[in-house]
Image (spheres, grey):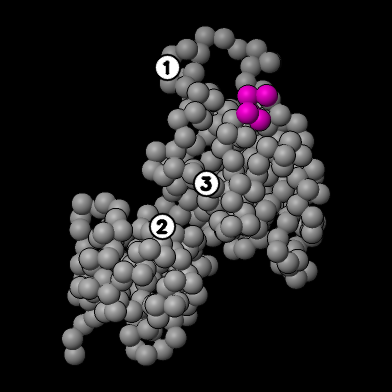
Amino acid sequence: MTKPTLWITRTLSDATLQRAQRDYSVIWDPADRPGTAEDIIEMSAKVDAIIPCHSEYFSAHVVGQLDPRLKIVANHSVGVDHCDLDALRAKGIAVTNTPGVLSDATAELAMMLMLAAARHAVEGDRIVRSGAWDFWSPAFLVGKQVTGARLGIIGMGGVGRSFARKARGFDMQIHYHNRSRLDADEEAGATYHADLDSLLAASDFLSLHCPATPQTVNLMNAERLARLPKGAVIVNTARGNLINESALIAAIESGHIGAAGLDCFVAEPGGNPAFAVHENIVMMPHVGSATVKTRDAMGFKALDNLDAFFRGETPPDRL
Protein backbone atom coordinates (compact mmCIF):
# COMPACT_ATOMS: atom_id res chain seq x y z
CA MET A 1 0.00 0.00 0.00
CA THR A 2 1.36 3.44 -0.95
CA LYS A 3 2.14 5.64 2.03
CA PRO A 4 0.43 9.05 2.15
CA THR A 5 2.78 11.92 1.38
CA LEU A 6 3.28 14.33 4.28
CA TRP A 7 4.91 17.75 4.33
CA ILE A 8 6.35 18.69 7.73
CA THR A 9 6.96 22.42 7.51
CA ARG A 10 9.42 22.86 10.42
CA THR A 11 11.95 20.80 12.36
CA LEU A 12 9.98 18.72 14.85
CA SER A 13 11.41 16.48 17.58
CA ASP A 14 13.65 13.60 16.55
CA ALA A 15 11.11 11.07 17.81
CA THR A 16 8.33 12.72 15.81
CA LEU A 17 10.37 12.79 12.61
CA GLN A 18 11.41 9.15 13.01
CA ARG A 19 7.82 7.99 13.49
CA ALA A 20 6.60 10.13 10.59
CA GLN A 21 9.27 8.79 8.25
CA ARG A 22 8.32 5.24 9.24
CA ASP A 23 4.65 5.66 8.36
CA TYR A 24 4.57 8.36 5.67
CA SER A 25 6.51 9.57 2.65
CA VAL A 26 7.87 12.69 4.31
CA ILE A 27 8.96 15.94 2.73
CA TRP A 28 10.92 18.02 5.20
CA ASP A 29 13.52 20.76 4.80
CA PRO A 30 16.24 20.75 7.50
CA ALA A 31 16.76 24.47 6.80
CA ASP A 32 13.80 24.93 9.18
CA ARG A 33 12.35 28.10 7.67
CA PRO A 34 8.69 29.13 7.82
CA GLY A 35 6.55 28.04 4.91
CA THR A 36 5.39 30.98 2.82
CA ALA A 37 2.00 31.30 1.16
CA GLU A 38 3.64 30.29 -2.11
CA ASP A 39 5.21 27.24 -0.46
CA ILE A 40 1.87 26.11 0.96
CA ILE A 41 0.07 26.49 -2.35
CA GLU A 42 2.84 24.70 -4.27
CA MET A 43 3.14 21.84 -1.78
CA SER A 44 -0.60 21.25 -1.69
CA ALA A 45 -0.32 19.67 -5.14
CA LYS A 46 2.43 17.31 -3.98
CA VAL A 47 1.19 16.05 -0.61
CA ASP A 48 -1.85 14.48 1.02
CA ALA A 49 -1.26 16.07 4.42
CA ILE A 50 0.61 18.92 6.09
CA ILE A 51 1.87 19.27 9.64
CA PRO A 52 2.35 23.04 10.02
CA CYS A 53 3.21 25.17 13.02
CA HIS A 54 1.80 28.58 13.92
CA SER A 55 4.41 30.07 11.56
CA GLU A 56 2.46 28.93 8.48
CA TYR A 57 -0.62 30.94 7.57
CA PHE A 58 -3.63 29.33 5.94
CA SER A 59 -5.52 32.50 5.07
CA ALA A 60 -8.69 32.43 2.99
CA HIS A 61 -6.62 33.66 0.05
CA VAL A 62 -4.15 30.77 0.43
CA VAL A 63 -6.85 28.17 1.07
CA GLY A 64 -8.70 29.22 -2.05
CA GLN A 65 -5.66 28.22 -4.12
CA LEU A 66 -4.93 24.86 -2.48
CA ASP A 67 -4.84 21.79 -4.70
CA PRO A 68 -7.59 19.19 -4.19
CA ARG A 69 -4.93 16.61 -3.38
CA LEU A 70 -4.42 18.08 0.11
CA LYS A 71 -6.87 16.44 2.51
CA ILE A 72 -5.78 17.34 6.05
CA VAL A 73 -3.86 19.99 7.98
CA ALA A 74 -2.69 18.50 11.29
CA ASN A 75 -1.42 21.46 13.29
CA HIS A 76 1.56 21.12 15.60
CA SER A 77 -0.07 23.58 18.02
CA VAL A 78 -3.15 24.13 20.13
CA GLY A 79 -3.84 27.60 18.82
CA VAL A 80 -5.18 27.73 15.28
CA ASP A 81 -5.43 31.48 14.74
CA HIS A 82 -3.06 31.02 11.78
CA CYS A 83 -5.78 29.01 10.02
CA ASP A 84 -8.98 30.29 8.43
CA LEU A 85 -11.09 27.39 9.67
CA ASP A 86 -14.19 28.39 7.73
CA ALA A 87 -12.25 28.51 4.47
CA LEU A 88 -10.62 25.14 5.15
CA ARG A 89 -13.95 23.51 6.01
CA ALA A 90 -15.52 24.93 2.87
CA LYS A 91 -12.63 23.45 0.90
CA GLY A 92 -13.25 20.05 2.50
CA ILE A 93 -9.89 19.97 4.25
CA ALA A 94 -9.80 18.44 7.72
CA VAL A 95 -8.05 20.46 10.45
CA THR A 96 -6.72 19.18 13.78
CA ASN A 97 -4.68 20.56 16.66
CA THR A 98 -2.82 19.25 19.73
CA PRO A 99 -4.79 20.05 22.89
CA GLY A 100 -4.03 18.72 26.34
CA VAL A 101 -0.33 17.94 26.00
CA LEU A 102 1.41 21.30 26.40
CA SER A 103 -0.49 22.71 29.37
CA ASP A 104 2.10 21.96 32.04
CA ALA A 105 5.10 23.14 30.03
CA THR A 106 3.43 26.42 29.12
CA ALA A 107 2.19 26.94 32.68
CA GLU A 108 5.74 26.35 33.94
CA LEU A 109 7.02 29.12 31.71
CA ALA A 110 4.20 31.42 32.83
CA MET A 111 5.23 30.77 36.43
CA MET A 112 8.86 31.52 35.60
CA LEU A 113 7.91 34.78 33.88
CA MET A 114 5.67 35.83 36.77
CA LEU A 115 8.36 35.24 39.36
CA ALA A 116 11.09 36.79 37.23
CA ALA A 117 9.02 39.90 36.53
CA ALA A 118 7.99 40.27 40.16
CA ARG A 119 11.54 39.94 41.52
CA HIS A 120 13.63 41.97 39.03
CA ALA A 121 15.33 38.93 37.51
CA VAL A 122 16.50 40.65 34.32
CA GLU A 123 17.98 43.65 36.11
CA GLY A 124 19.54 41.55 38.85
CA ASP A 125 21.14 39.16 36.38
CA ARG A 126 22.58 42.08 34.39
CA ILE A 127 24.03 43.72 37.48
CA VAL A 128 25.82 40.58 38.64
CA ARG A 129 26.83 39.35 35.18
CA SER A 130 28.31 42.72 34.17
CA GLY A 131 30.38 43.08 37.34
CA ALA A 132 28.40 46.16 38.35
CA TRP A 133 27.31 44.74 41.72
CA ASP A 134 29.19 47.02 44.11
CA PHE A 135 26.34 48.14 46.36
CA TRP A 136 23.69 46.70 48.66
CA SER A 137 20.89 48.33 50.62
CA PRO A 138 17.55 47.24 52.08
CA ALA A 139 16.00 49.32 49.31
CA PHE A 140 17.94 47.50 46.56
CA LEU A 141 15.86 45.65 43.92
CA VAL A 142 12.78 45.39 46.12
CA GLY A 143 10.15 43.40 44.25
CA LYS A 144 6.54 42.35 44.52
CA GLN A 145 5.75 39.32 46.67
CA VAL A 146 3.93 36.50 44.95
CA THR A 147 3.01 34.42 47.99
CA GLY A 148 -0.52 35.17 49.14
CA ALA A 149 -1.20 37.66 46.34
CA ARG A 150 -4.33 37.74 44.18
CA LEU A 151 -3.86 36.07 40.81
CA GLY A 152 -6.25 36.74 37.96
CA ILE A 153 -6.39 34.25 35.10
CA ILE A 154 -8.12 34.98 31.81
CA GLY A 155 -8.93 31.68 30.12
CA MET A 156 -9.31 28.53 32.22
CA GLY A 157 -8.56 25.90 29.62
CA GLY A 158 -5.83 23.36 30.13
CA VAL A 159 -3.00 25.88 30.51
CA GLY A 160 -4.98 28.20 32.75
CA ARG A 161 -5.98 25.38 35.09
CA SER A 162 -2.41 24.04 35.21
CA PHE A 163 -1.12 27.50 36.04
CA ALA A 164 -3.71 27.85 38.80
CA ARG A 165 -2.61 24.54 40.33
CA LYS A 166 1.01 25.68 40.37
CA ALA A 167 0.10 29.10 41.77
CA ARG A 168 -1.71 27.48 44.69
CA GLY A 169 1.73 26.24 45.79
CA PHE A 170 2.48 29.90 46.50
CA ASP A 171 -0.78 30.29 48.43
CA MET A 172 -2.06 32.68 45.78
CA GLN A 173 -5.74 33.60 45.81
CA ILE A 174 -7.05 32.42 42.43
CA HIS A 175 -9.57 34.51 40.50
CA TYR A 176 -10.58 33.79 36.92
CA HIS A 177 -12.65 34.92 33.95
CA ASN A 178 -13.77 32.37 31.38
CA ARG A 179 -16.44 31.99 28.73
CA SER A 180 -18.26 29.73 31.17
CA ARG A 181 -17.86 28.87 34.82
CA LEU A 182 -15.96 25.69 35.64
CA ASP A 183 -17.43 22.78 37.56
CA ALA A 184 -16.78 22.97 41.28
CA ASP A 185 -14.08 20.27 41.22
CA GLU A 186 -12.19 22.03 38.41
CA GLU A 187 -12.70 25.40 40.05
CA ALA A 188 -11.04 24.11 43.24
CA GLY A 189 -12.06 27.11 45.31
CA ALA A 190 -11.14 29.77 42.74
CA THR A 191 -13.37 32.83 42.48
CA TYR A 192 -15.24 33.16 39.18
CA HIS A 193 -15.80 36.59 37.64
CA ALA A 194 -18.39 36.68 34.90
CA ASP A 195 -17.37 40.29 34.30
CA LEU A 196 -13.81 40.92 33.07
CA ASP A 197 -13.55 44.32 34.72
CA SER A 198 -14.38 42.71 38.07
CA LEU A 199 -11.52 40.26 37.59
CA LEU A 200 -9.04 42.99 36.69
CA ALA A 201 -9.78 44.94 39.85
CA ALA A 202 -8.99 41.81 41.90
CA SER A 203 -5.70 40.94 40.14
CA ASP A 204 -2.36 41.84 41.71
CA PHE A 205 -0.99 39.48 39.06
CA LEU A 206 -2.75 38.78 35.76
CA SER A 207 -1.97 35.88 33.44
CA LEU A 208 -3.45 35.47 29.95
CA HIS A 209 -4.37 31.97 28.75
CA CYS A 210 -7.17 32.58 26.26
CA PRO A 211 -7.06 32.00 22.48
CA ALA A 212 -6.67 34.82 20.00
CA THR A 213 -10.04 35.47 18.38
CA PRO A 214 -11.65 38.59 16.90
CA GLN A 215 -13.17 39.14 20.35
CA THR A 216 -9.88 38.88 22.27
CA VAL A 217 -7.46 40.77 20.00
CA ASN A 218 -6.32 43.85 21.97
CA LEU A 219 -8.22 42.50 24.96
CA MET A 220 -5.77 44.26 27.26
CA ASN A 221 -5.98 47.79 25.92
CA ALA A 222 -5.22 51.03 27.75
CA GLU A 223 -8.63 51.10 29.44
CA ARG A 224 -8.36 47.58 30.78
CA LEU A 225 -4.74 47.91 31.86
CA ALA A 226 -5.84 50.96 33.87
CA ARG A 227 -8.37 48.81 35.74
CA LEU A 228 -5.62 46.66 37.23
CA PRO A 229 -4.34 47.68 40.66
CA LYS A 230 -1.33 49.99 40.58
CA GLY A 231 1.87 47.95 40.42
CA ALA A 232 0.17 44.87 38.96
CA VAL A 233 2.26 42.34 37.03
CA ILE A 234 0.94 40.99 33.72
CA VAL A 235 2.02 37.70 32.11
CA ASN A 236 1.25 36.53 28.59
CA THR A 237 2.10 33.06 27.30
CA ALA A 238 -0.89 32.83 24.93
CA ARG A 239 -0.80 35.11 21.87
CA GLY A 240 0.88 38.47 21.45
CA ASN A 241 -2.10 40.28 19.98
CA LEU A 242 -4.10 39.84 23.18
CA ILE A 243 -2.23 42.89 24.49
CA ASN A 244 -2.06 46.32 22.90
CA GLU A 245 1.72 46.68 23.09
CA SER A 246 1.76 50.49 22.89
CA ALA A 247 -0.70 50.66 25.77
CA LEU A 248 1.40 48.24 27.81
CA ILE A 249 4.55 50.32 27.27
CA ALA A 250 2.70 53.46 28.34
CA ALA A 251 1.39 51.69 31.47
CA ILE A 252 4.89 50.43 32.31
CA GLU A 253 6.42 53.87 31.81
CA SER A 254 3.76 55.54 33.95
CA GLY A 255 4.39 53.02 36.75
CA HIS A 256 0.80 51.80 36.78
CA ILE A 257 1.92 48.36 35.61
CA GLY A 258 4.81 47.24 37.78
CA ALA A 259 6.26 44.59 35.47
CA ALA A 260 5.44 42.19 32.66
CA GLY A 261 6.51 38.71 31.60
CA LEU A 262 5.98 38.00 27.90
CA ASP A 263 6.51 34.88 25.79
CA CYS A 264 4.62 36.12 22.74
CA PHE A 265 4.41 39.30 20.72
CA VAL A 266 2.46 40.87 17.89
CA ALA A 267 5.49 40.55 15.59
CA GLU A 268 7.10 37.12 15.63
CA PRO A 269 9.92 36.41 15.29
CA GLY A 270 11.56 39.60 16.51
CA GLY A 271 9.25 40.86 19.21
CA ASN A 272 8.89 44.54 20.02
CA PRO A 273 12.20 46.48 20.28
CA ALA A 274 10.46 49.12 22.39
CA PHE A 275 10.18 46.59 25.23
CA ALA A 276 13.95 46.06 25.37
CA VAL A 277 14.73 49.30 27.22
CA HIS A 278 12.54 48.27 30.16
CA GLU A 279 14.26 45.88 32.55
CA ASN A 280 10.97 45.22 34.31
CA ILE A 281 9.74 43.48 31.14
CA VAL A 282 10.98 39.87 31.07
CA MET A 283 10.86 38.30 27.61
CA MET A 284 11.16 34.84 26.10
CA PRO A 285 10.96 33.97 22.36
CA HIS A 286 7.63 32.07 22.29
CA VAL A 287 8.96 28.85 23.83
CA GLY A 288 6.16 27.98 26.25
CA SER A 289 5.92 24.38 25.06
CA ALA A 290 9.65 23.93 24.47
CA THR A 291 10.47 20.85 26.53
CA VAL A 292 11.53 17.53 25.06
CA LYS A 293 8.61 15.72 26.66
CA THR A 294 6.04 18.19 25.39
CA ARG A 295 7.41 18.56 21.86
CA ASP A 296 7.38 14.75 21.52
CA ALA A 297 3.80 14.67 22.77
CA MET A 298 2.70 17.42 20.37
CA GLY A 299 4.30 15.69 17.41
CA PHE A 300 2.80 12.32 18.33
CA LYS A 301 -0.65 13.89 18.74
CA ALA A 302 -0.42 15.43 15.27
CA LEU A 303 0.55 12.03 13.89
CA ASP A 304 -2.22 10.29 15.84
CA ASN A 305 -4.68 12.59 14.09
CA LEU A 306 -3.17 11.79 10.71
CA ASP A 307 -3.17 8.06 11.40
CA ALA A 308 -6.87 8.12 12.30
CA PHE A 309 -7.74 10.20 9.24
CA PHE A 310 -5.97 7.88 6.82
CA ARG A 311 -7.63 4.85 8.45
CA GLY A 312 -10.95 6.44 7.53
CA GLU A 313 -11.76 7.43 11.12
CA THR A 314 -12.57 10.83 12.63
CA PRO A 315 -9.32 12.31 14.02
CA PRO A 316 -9.58 12.67 17.81
CA ASP A 317 -8.71 16.39 17.70
CA ARG A 318 -10.59 17.43 14.58
CA LEU A 319 -11.84 21.01 14.77
Residue at x 49% of width, y 60% of height = 81
Residue at x 76% of width, y 39% of height = 227
* Total numbered badges shown on the rendered structure: 3
Question: In terms of secondary structure, what is the magenta stretch mainly?
Answer: helix
Q: Nearer the viewer, mark 1 or mark 2?
A: 2
* Position above or below: 163 against 233: below
Q: Can you give x and y, in whole percent of width and height, for residue 155 in the image?
A: 65, 58
* Position above or below: 243 against 187: above
**Residue 146 shown in magenta:** no
- CA gap between label 3 and label 2 equals 12 Å
Magenta part of the chain: 250-254
Residue topped by disc 2: 54
Residue topped by disc 1: 130
- Whether pointer 3 and pointer 2 mark residues with C-beta atoms closer than 8 Å, the reply is no
Q: What amino acid type should be assigned to the residue bearing mark 3?
A: Gly
- CA gap between label 1 and label 2 equals 36 Å
Q: Quadrant of the N terminus?
A: bottom left
Disc 3 secondary structure class? helix
Q: Can you give x and y, in whole percent of width and height, for residue 78 in the image?
A: 49, 63
Q: Can you give x and y, in whole percent of width and height, for residue 254 in the image?
A: 68, 24
Earlier sequence position, callout 1 versus callout 2: 2
* Position above or below: 105 against 80: above
Q: Quadrant of residue 183?
A: bottom right
Disc 1 secondary structure class? loop
Residue topped by disc 3: 240
